[in-house]
Image (cartoon, rainbow, N blue to C red):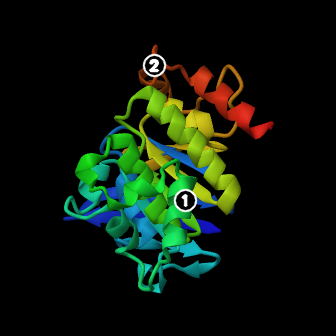
Amino acid sequence: MIECRHVFKQFNKKEVLKDCHFSLKKGENVGIMGESGTGKSTLARLLVGLEKASSGEILLDGKPYSAKEGAKVLLVFQDATHAVNPLFTVKEILTEARQDTVAQDELVSILNDVGLDESYLTKTSRQLSGGQLQRVCIARALLLKPEVIIFDEALSGLDPLIQGQLLRLLYQLKETYQQTYIFISHDFNLCYAICNRILVMFDGTIVDEITRFENPIQIHHPATQNLLVESQNPKYSKCQLRKMMVTLETK
């Protein structure tokens, strides 16, 4: 579905991405992990067509992808507050990117899908909690019917309970819409909970790939070990998150 072929990216003669090479199949959930400054967000911007690679190519369904062709790959940002116009109502937030008129029933249906009701349509972003606003941003992405949604730290910084609720929601939406997800994160717990495999980035390069999650997890690079150590969350462990997702998968 998506192929990233030996992609390099430079800013002011500094290499930010170095020979990034991977592929993504339809229906996969893939995590891309790394510490801050490793090139994760730059790679996300390339994948959605907001930036162009200095060399290499990114293909969607075997063809070069450009955002001008339509919203086939969408990005949901970490800071939902700055991703929307604070003066807009939820209805305006949902419809601003659509070129056609969106029926009220469709708006209500998509809100229901993300766990919100019709009453939210008239509220502004300032009246919503962080978790509610992130649900609105997910609904906005789904309204555009993309083939791939990339979550750039979109669940980071939220209360662990809210993270769990949104992970459950995303799994349910994946089943409903046959969606493909990419999770950009530094948090192993979140990727572990919902991803089929995890790519690890270090210094602009993909240095490791986790495809099996049995204990002990096979590690091939020190950066992976560091991420695993730093992602221990005593409030809501990766085991609890993973158990919740496995329960959903087996229903």
Q: Earlier in the sequence, mark 1 or mark 2?
A: 1
Label 1 neighbourhood size at 10 Å, few (<14), some (14-19), many (20+)?
A: some
Q: Is residue 179 left or right of residue 124?
A: right
Residue 227 in the image: state x and y as whole percent: 45, 29
Q: Is residue 182 left or right of residue 127?
A: right
Please state which amino acid type lies under the numbered disc 1.
His
Quarter holding the N terminus?
A: bottom right
Q: Quadrant of residue 60?
A: bottom right
Q: Is residue 108 left or right of residue 53?
A: right
Q: Residue furthest right?
A: 250
In this rendering, the answer to whether 201 lies above or below 72 is above
Please state which amino acid type lies under the numbered disc 2.
Asn
Residue 175 in the image: state x and y as whole percent: 70, 54
Q: Residue at x 45, y 16 (%)?
A: 235
- Residue 137: numbered disc: none
Mark 1 or mark 2: which is in front?
A: 2
Confirm whether residue 30 shows in the render.
yes
Q: Residue at x 68, y 40 (%)?
A: 211
Q: Under tag 1, what secondary structure?
A: strand
Q: Under tag 2, what secondary structure?
A: loop
Quarter holding the C terminus?
A: top right
Q: Residue at x 59, y 34 (%)?
A: 192
Label 2 neighbourhood size at 10 Å, few (<14), some (14-19), many (20+)?
A: few
Residue 44 in the image: state x and y as whole percent: 42, 59
In this rendering, the answer to whether 54 lies above or below 44 is below
Q: Residue furthest top?
A: 234
Q: Residue at x 30, y 58 (%)?
A: 15
Residue linked to disc 2: 233
Residue linked to disc 1: 21
Confirm whether residue 28 shows in the render.
no
Pointers 1 and 2 in contact (CB under 8 A)? Answer: no
In this rendering, the answer to whether 9 lies above or below 170 is below
